[in-house]
Image: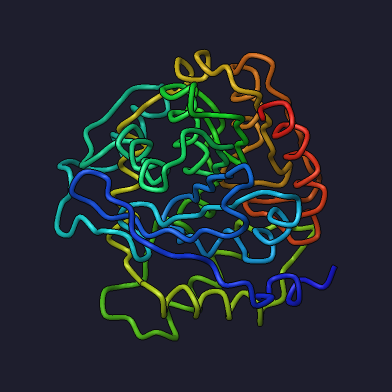
Amino acid sequence: MDEPLARRPSGIEPRTGNAPSGDLDLHYQDIGDPNDPPVLLIMGLGAQLLLWRQGFCEKLVAQGLRVIRYDNRDVGLSSKLDGLRSNGSVLPKLARSFVGKKNAGVYTLEDMADDAAVLDHMGLDRAHIVGASMGGMIAQVFAARHADRTASLAVFFSSNNKPLLPPPTPRALLAVVKSPPTGSPRERIVAEAVKARRVIGSPMYPAPIALLRADAEEAFDRCYYPEGVSRQFEAILASGSLVDYDRQITAPTVVIHGLADRLMRPAGGRAIASAIPNARLVLFDGMGHELPAELWDQVISELKITFTEGW
């Protein structure tokens, strides 16, 4: 598959809006027949809904699904919690998180799971819940706390923060949590984003530099807000181990992970699949912390198996 073409919008215009979640507004895009089974896509740390690529969403729509993607709080076109930050150094919090303990944060993954109330705004009682990276953590919490609303669950390249799991490589972690200095020009910010994507990307499916640059420019021009990344990262550290949540999940579940993921090691996916009753684990050689276009068809085939069980 030609990746640049795969990511090029086909002309399908999404329905857009803002859904309230407490005092916050969450920006969403809705694609497909409103009468088809809905799929709610939840993206990861600091990532806008753009990372659920239009081409990927349209392939899901072609399978007879209604696709809803949204910006998490503190990112994209959703509400920002300007100026709020918890106290204390991040290093002790990382150490506590490594052994499965909770930390202080401005908000938690549980709060972010409540933001999936975008479903309420759209009048949807249940949906297939799909989360990637931090979004996969949010999805686990949602599926445990709202079993009646979770038709099925899919978790991409994520973790349940089980104690003593292998940590990210330092280079991969810094690539996603370290921002250029305040006031940096657009070109430097774009270049750093391209570099980060190359660090955490898929060795077997490297994206063309021109495409990575176009992605980074699109994300910057839509909304560049690095302050939200630190608060979202603290939300992960604030929630601690999700193993107890996993044990409560009853929905059909598939866990998809890349064996070349340097940020969320494959052990994270294995831990989720081991903790959720009857979960399926699907591992892809050469896939990093992303969904390469070359694997979209295979990934969607795995999703269809799980979606069929849950609807």
Q: Does residue 296 sit above or below 267 in this rendering?
A: below
Work out whether residue 163 can be spotted. Answer: no
Q: Quadrant of residue 81?
A: bottom left
Where is residue 20? Give x, y as percent.
27, 50
Where is residue 111? Give x, y as percent.
30, 36
Question: What colour scheme has been applied to the protein in the rendered image?
Answer: rainbow
Image quarter (top left, top right, bottom left or bottom right) of the N terminus: bottom right
Q: Quadrant of residue 258?
A: top right
Left or right for 245, reference 272: left
In the image, what residue occupies the spot 43% across and 28% down?
141
Where is residue 93? Give x, y as percent.
30, 34
Of residues 17 and 238, which is closer to you in this image? Answer: 17
Q: Does residue 2 sit above or below 247 in this rendering?
A: below
Work out whether residue 271 can be spotted. Answer: yes
In the image, what residue occupies the spot 26% across and 30% down?
103
Q: Does residue 187 sit above or below 257 in this rendering?
A: below
Image quarter (top left, top right, bottom left or bottom right) of the C terminus: top right
Give the total of numbered labels.
Answer: 0
Left or right for 124, reference 250: left
Q: Does residue 178 sit above or below 289 in this rendering?
A: below
User: What is the residue that sits farthest to the right in this orientation?
Assistant: 1
Where is residue 219? Give x, y as percent.
46, 73
Left or right for 273, reference 241: right
In the image, what residue occupies the spot 38% across and 64% down?
76
